[in-house]
Each structure stands twice: as structure tokens, then as C-alpha cells.
Amino acid sequence: MPDADGRVAAATAGWLRQARWFGDKHHEPASSRLTVLENILLAAGDTPAGNLRLLVLAIEPAVGAGSRYIVPVRCLEQPDGSVLTTDAATDPAFAHWLLALLAAEGSVPGREGRLCGRRTAAATRAGVWPPGSTLQVNPLGGDASNTSCAVTSPGESPVVLKLLRRFRSGIQPEVEMGLFLEHEGWPGAPPLLGWLEYQPADGVEQAGVLATVHAGLTETESLWAVLRSTAEEGTAVHQDQREMAAGLGRLTAELHTTLARQPTHPAFEPLKPTAAAVATLVTGMVEHATAVLSELAAVKTAGSLQSRLDRVAAHRLNLLERLQSLQAAPLTAPFIRVHGDYHLGQVLWQRPTRRLWVIDFEGEPSRTLEQRREKTSVFKDLAGVCRSFDYLARTVSRVPGASTVDAAELSRIFLQAYEQTAAGQCFWPTDPDEVQRLLAAFTLDKAIYELAYELHNRPDWLEVPLAAVERLLDAGEER
């Protein structure tokens, strides 16, 4: 069709900004600034040829570097010659095409590169390839930067397909971590079965991962959903909450122990925290906090929230000094690879076995692949869980009749179980003062990250991380 890219761009720009995973909402994705880098025919099936396509779209902002997005679409010709596009990420035909490509380890050429299917040894052992002819696709969650779906077929094991909406070239932590944990035989995560890769043709840019496929689990919910639903029902679940928090602490320590197990593996070798390494860590925290707090200072809202924002902005130097306190004394516990985006939504609870599973190892989507692969303190993950308990408590507190969730107690139980399991491992500090400095700095860093996230995506939730920052300020004033 003539000017196919222009018509596809115009049709897609109309709904792209409303997509939850679209991270450039502050840039209007007008079709004039949306470039179709790839427009690859995936499968015709029993629909008109050219109906199902995979797009690589470039968004060019007025200032700064652009972003690239992965968007599978159905394209429908209209009587007036225009094109209607709809997101096909949850379309069974797209799932079937992707799984079949991975099963065959095949490739599909594009004009700028090539799509390649990769599969792991775990896929053969799981017996899920090739996919059946009838697939059922169910979206998982609605508040994510990517699109995940449970894919089932009669008589076959379920799989989870995750489409990584932002294209970034380079080593994807989700794949790297999955392969490593499989090699080490760690049983706490669903096995990685394969991934979809895009290889640019010019040979200058590295290949990048577009989608991953993991083994699916039956009768599971996220730990967040389990704890939230039982509390909102008013059920007396405090003992269950404690047991789950302790179990999560032990599981997390086992994960970190596995990630630190290979002292000669370049990507996973524990790293002694030299003064230079700590300075780099603190500099990153301070620069990020400075940018977020400056943006927060420009926010104008109504009521008491404004005075609270003004107070945080006024104590900007105080907060930055809290982060810089990590350098007050040398750190002794080595940095290792960690999950990187760890919270209650990244852990599954399997009801029949009462077992916990860790998922989603891609790291924080807003950070570069290089940043996500950096070795750091395990307290990055620990602070993430503690902050997640706080989010849970505040979410439940808004529901009339719900039972109370004690975030402080659950954090204490989680950390205690973690320490008991991790004691003696290289990554756990022997000095209690070092433990407290690391926990305080990473908790503040996480809360500031949440401030930016809520400001850009869910302004109604800004109060939750704001309250955490205020508590840290109050605790400092009491000392």
C-alpha cells in the first residue's frame, strides 16, 4: 500500500499516548514526530494479508534523545483509504507467531534488521514447544511498563509472554539473570524458556530483546494481591502476613546467595565496594534526587499537600546529606547483582504449595540496561520490599472495614528472616551501623524514585512516597 508507514503512524499516534506502557506522555506523539523504523509482516493466518504486523516506532522529542517502542498491531484498511490500527499484544495470533518462531529458533527479516527466536534447554525439558493451534491469552495486570500475558493451550503447560515495550539494544537483565539462575539450578524462579531478539542490520548497534517467555505457574497470585485482598476482606490474617514476610526474607536471601555464588563469573562476581565505587553509587543517588526534588518543587497543587511539598523542597539539602552519609565510613559488604526492581508485585504466592516465586528480573524500566546490570548493595532489594509493605498498608487503609496492615512490623520480620538466612554471606555487613546506613540510604533513594514515578504516572498516589520522605525527615530532626 502506498505510504504505508505514514498511514500506520497516523493511525497509531491516535491511541499511543493513552497506552499505560507509553513512557513519553509528556511528548505528544504526533505522527509527524513518530517514525516507523520497522513494519514487519508477521502472519496472515485466516485474515487478510498484512493484517498482523510488528512495528518498531521511534518517538523524537523536541529536545533530547528519542525512544523506541515495540508495538504489534492489526492493520485494517478503511473505505476512505486510511488505516485503523489496534494493539495486538494480547492477540492469540501474535502469541502463536511468537511462540512458533521461538520453538523453531527461526528468523524474520525486516528492512533495518532481523527478528530472531531464541529458546533455552529448559524449553525442551518443559515440553511446551511447539505451541498448540488453539491458544488462550489472558493479560496479567494492568499497571506495568510492559505487557505480560498468560498463554495456555489445551493439554500443554502454560507460559508467560512478556513484551518489552521499550526497545533498548544490549544485554537484557531478564535474559541474563534467567540463564544464570537456570545454570545455577536455583528453584525460586519460573524457568526462562526463550526470547525474541531484534538484530539491527548495520552491525554497529547491539541486538536487543523484544520479548521473553517463561514457564507459567498455576494457581498463583502476586504476594501484593494476596495480602491486599485478605486485608480488604477484613480477615484476621496477621499471622499469615507474618509468615509470608518471613518466607519472603528467606527466599530473598537465598536468591542473593545464588547471585553471589560465582566469584569468577565477570557479570556476577561480587565487587568489593571501593571508595570510588561507593562515590559513584552516591553520586548517582544524589543526582537523581536533585533532579526529582527540583521537579517536585515546581509542582503546584491545592490544600495541605502543597505545604508538604514545600517542606520537602525546603529540606532538599538535608535529604541529599542523608544519601551522602553512605560515605561517612567505608562499606565492607561486597556489591553483587540484585533483582533491581523488587517489591511484592514481583513475588508470586502459589496457594496449593504455599510457595513463593520471584519473577521479573529486568530491573527498573526507567533506567538504562547498563545501570540495571550494575552490581550494588543487596539493600536496594531489601528497601524495595520495605517500601512495598508501606504501599500495601496505605492502600488497605483507604478501604472501609479492612484489617490493619502493620508495615513496620512486616518489614522488621522480613529483614530479620533475611539476616538469619544471609548471615555469613559476603554481601551481608557484619557491622550493625553499616546495615542501618545502607538501609536508610536505599530506602530514601527508593522513596525519591517513587516520587518521580507517581508524579509522572499516578499523581493521586504522590502522597504515599511523600509521607515516607517526611518520616525520614522527622526521624533526622529527632536525633
Image (spheres, rainbow, N blue to C red):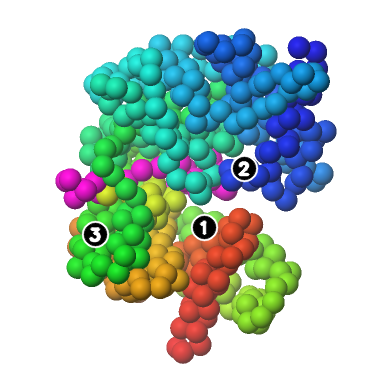
Q: Which residue is mark 1?
A: 281
Residue type, mark 2 in image:
Ala
Q: What is the spatial separation of the Cα atoms under label 1 and label 2, in whole angstroms?
A: 33 Å
Marks 2,3: beta carbons within 8 A: no
Q: What kind of residue is marked 3?
A: Met
> Can you identify the residue that label 3 sits on?
244
Packing grade of label 1 (10 A; few <14, some 14-19, many >=20) is many
Q: Main secondary structure of the magenta part?
A: loop
Location of residue 61 by image quarter: top right
Residue 187: image quadrant is top left
Tell me the residue at 45%/41% (across/down): 362
Q: Which mark is residue 1?
A: none
Find the magenta span and give its range.
Answer: 350-375
180 inside magenta stretch = no
Left of 265 or right of it: where is 39?
right
Instruction: Name the quadrant of the C terminus.
Output: bottom left
Q: Earlier in the sequence, mark 3 or mark 1?
A: 3
Q: Residue at x 26, y 42 (%)?
A: 219
Q: Report the Cα–Cα distance between label 3 and label 1.
A: 31 Å
Q: Nearer the viewer, mark 3 or mark 1?
A: 3
Q: Secondary structure at mark 1?
A: helix
